[in-house]
Image: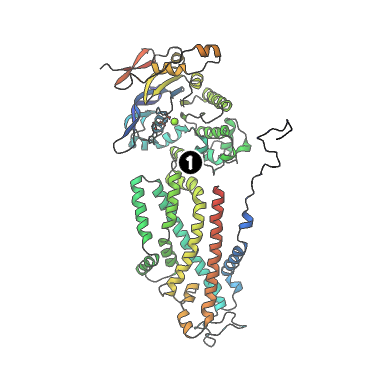
């Protein structure tokens, strides 16, 4: 028992009171992943400064050379310098990743919000449509659209992977919008005459952006993989447009001639980039869970 | 005389479809007029349909039957609504009960207050939107240091002031306030009520003031209607309503106001209302000038 009559029970002494736990943002932040990704992205963006050779120049004397002083990562079967191609081609791969993510995100946000704001029957129709698209294997859809579009280039590949990859983001957006649309600030905005896009931009997007951030980042990864896959199976970018995918598409021949560096260099860059993106993506997801508590 | 009427609600009925067979008549054929420059109170217990009336007036809900004339425009009619879109968007504003949910938590006070101006592309008389927001904020008794605060950082009373400032920024003719003080502490309630009274005296806004607190209605409103289960049972000037209540439900409501004297309070009979005489058809009848009481039709 407490003998002191003047200590009030039920009130914690100040020392015991826990101050708000500081958010451990910095600590969890994947520094290594962000650093490596930054190096890769910057290297690709300013590839002119990094490259040692002209990536498109076919040195017919030095074809399929293993790595050495002059050709840091060796040359491919057409005599192009792989080290230079990696930075140059990374630009295309990353561009496709970001472009197609932008396309998917815009489609997903508009479609998801439309579905979320629509009356119940239209919402049901739109969401079933999205599910049908989602249920078709992505690659099949990409191949179909690509075949319809004709010759592949950077824009068409971005568009195709973007157009096929929005459904899961749209579902998240739709669920969030459905919860928010009854909130009185959306009703109030509509009373003041706010149109669909005004409400979408001012009220809805800021509130769901954090929950689709993770998915958008993962979408960059998916798009880069799609580009590589397409190029690998031969319906992606043609060989003369250098990208990590089109570089990998040479691997068949490379394997036959025992030229391991032709696959390893672009493959390693691809895998490292994807790992970094994944790491940052899962950090975003965890961070979101924290902020929701 | 007709020019003095800003808002006219005629035989308004709103039904909520609860399931295939069940229909809830939340508002059942009510009519009233709100004159320009008056504060019209709508009182009733929780669930009597007050918010539904407000939402119909603001076009948030579509009434099942009846019409609502605002400034001579039938707001239930899509064509007329479209033709007068701008006028309706700026001249009618609503203040919700719960300021925590009626303000976007991710916008600053300045952005919130400027939102209607941006939507309607109003040229601001005071230069920038920010200056305008600051002016409106001053007007409701807050200073410029609150401009960059987010709603969760403000107290309930402050938030409600921001909501009022947002509504006022359009200088509307009609302000619909749906229980604007019900979520506030008593002392803050008094501040907000005085703010309303002050604004009305200074600016001559017309209020449709919804409350379940009779004392507030008595203090603030010029006329009041008592709503019970979606019907108006009594409508009269406030003084008349409180001094000479005619309908048993009104009597019951008034008897529930506590008297701040224990001896009188204990001796006072509590009138109960059993809901009799409100089941079927009937209509409002005038007992004296401007004092209408619900009379059940004789069967
Ligand atoms: N969206 C809705 N769907 C179904 N019923 C509703 C809805 N909104 C309100 N109601 C019902 O309508 C009646 C009146 O509600 P409301 O107008 O909010 O009352 P008040 O504001 O007077 O408390 C209540 O019985 C309520 O349950
Ligand atoms: Mg209500």
Pick the residue in front: B93 or B274.
Answer: B274
Q: Residue furthest front?
A: A1
Residue A86 lies, in percent from the top left, at 54, 74
| Residue appearing at x 44%, y 59% in the figure | A104
Quadrant position of ligand 1: top left
Q: Is B10 situated left or right of B200 in this image?
A: left
Q: Is residue A260 visible?
A: yes
Please name the colour scheme applied to the rendered image. Answer: rainbow
- In the rendered image, the residue lying farthest to the bottom is A61
Please give left or right for residue B10 compared with residue B208 in the image: left
Quarter-of-image position of residue B50: top left
Residue A23 coordinates in the image, percent (x, y): 62, 50
Label 1: which residue?
Answer: B121
Q: Position of residue A22 (x, y in %)?
A: 64, 49
SS at circle 1: loop
Q: Quarter holding the C terminus of chain B?
A: top left
Quarter of the rendering occupied by the N terminus of chain B = top left
Residue A261's place in the image compared with B124, above or below, is below
Q: Nearer the viewer, residue A246 or A173?
A: A173
């Amino acid at each position: 028992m407490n003998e002191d009559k003047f200590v009030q029970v039920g009130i914690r002494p100040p020392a015991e009171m826990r101050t708000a736990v500081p958010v451990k943002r910095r600590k969890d932040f994947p520094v290594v992943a962000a650093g490596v990704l930054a190096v890769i992205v910057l290297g690709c963006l300013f590839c002119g400064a990094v490259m040692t050779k002209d990536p498109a120049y076919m040195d017919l004397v030095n074809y399929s050379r293993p790595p050495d002083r002059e050709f840091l990562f060796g040359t491919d079967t057409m005599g192009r310098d792989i080290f230079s191609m990696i930075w140059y081609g990374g630009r295309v791969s990353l561009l496709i990743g970001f472009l197609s993510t932008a396309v998917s995100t815009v489609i997903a946000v508009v479609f998801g919000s439309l579905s979320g704001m629509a009356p119940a029957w239209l919402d049901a129709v739109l969401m079933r449509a999205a599910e049908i698209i989602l249920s078709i294997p992505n690659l099949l859809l990409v191949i179909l659209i690509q075949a319809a579009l004709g010759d592949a280039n950077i824009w068409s590949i971005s568009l195709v992977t973007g157009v096929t990859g929005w459904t899961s983001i749209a579902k998240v957006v739709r669920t969030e919008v459905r919860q928010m649309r009854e909130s009185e600030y959306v009703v109030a905005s509509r009373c003041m005459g706010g149109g669909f896009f005004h409400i979408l931009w001012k009220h809805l997007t800021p509130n769901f952006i954090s929950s689709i951030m993770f998915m958008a980042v993962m979408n960059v990864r998916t798009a880069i993989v799609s580009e590589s896959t397409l190029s690998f199976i031969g319906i992606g970018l043609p060989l003369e447009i250098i990208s990590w995918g089109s570089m990998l598409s040479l691997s068949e021949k490379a394997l036959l001639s025992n030229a391991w560096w032709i696959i390893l260099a672009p493959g390693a860059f691809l895998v490292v980039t994807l790992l970094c993106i994944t790491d940052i993506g899962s950090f975003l997801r965890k961070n979101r869970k924290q902020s929701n508590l | 005389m007709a020019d003095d009427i800003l808002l006219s609600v005629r035989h308004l009925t709103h039904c909520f479809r609860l399931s295939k067979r069940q229909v809830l008549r939340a508002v059942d054929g009510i009519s009233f007029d709100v004159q320009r420059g008056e504060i019209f109170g709508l009182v009733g217990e929780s669930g009597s349909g007050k918010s539904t009336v407000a939402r119909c007036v603001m076009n948030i809900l579509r009434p099942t039957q009846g019409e609502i004339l605002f400034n001579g425009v039938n707001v239930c009619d899509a064509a007329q609504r479209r033709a007068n879109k701008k006028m309706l968007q700026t001249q009618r504003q609503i203040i919700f009960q719960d300021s925590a949910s009626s303000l976007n938590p991710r916008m600053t006070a300045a952005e919130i207050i400027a939102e209607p101006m941006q939507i309607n592309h109003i040229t601001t008389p005071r230069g920038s939107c920010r200056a305008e927001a600051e002016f409106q904020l001053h007007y409701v008794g807050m200073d410029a240091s609150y401009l960059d605060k987010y709603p969760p950082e403000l107290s309930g009373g402050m938030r409600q002031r921001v909501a009022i400032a947002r509504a006022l920024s359009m200088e509307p003719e009609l302000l619909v306030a749906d229980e604007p003080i019900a979520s506030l502490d008593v002392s803050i309630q008094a501040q907000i009520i005085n703010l309303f009274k002050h604004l009305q005296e200074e600016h001559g806004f017309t209020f449709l003031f919804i409350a379940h607190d009779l004392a507030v209605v008595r203090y603030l409103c010029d006329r009041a209607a008592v709503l019970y289960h979606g019907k108006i049972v009594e409508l009269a000037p406030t003084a008349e309503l409180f001094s000479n209540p005619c309908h048993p439900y009104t009597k019951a409501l008034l008897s529930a106001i506590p008297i701040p004297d224990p001896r009188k309070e204990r001796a006072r009979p509590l009138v109960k209302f059993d809901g009799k005489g409100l089941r079927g058809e009937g209509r409002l009848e005038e007992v004296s000038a401007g004092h209408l009481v619900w009379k059940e039709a004789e069967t």
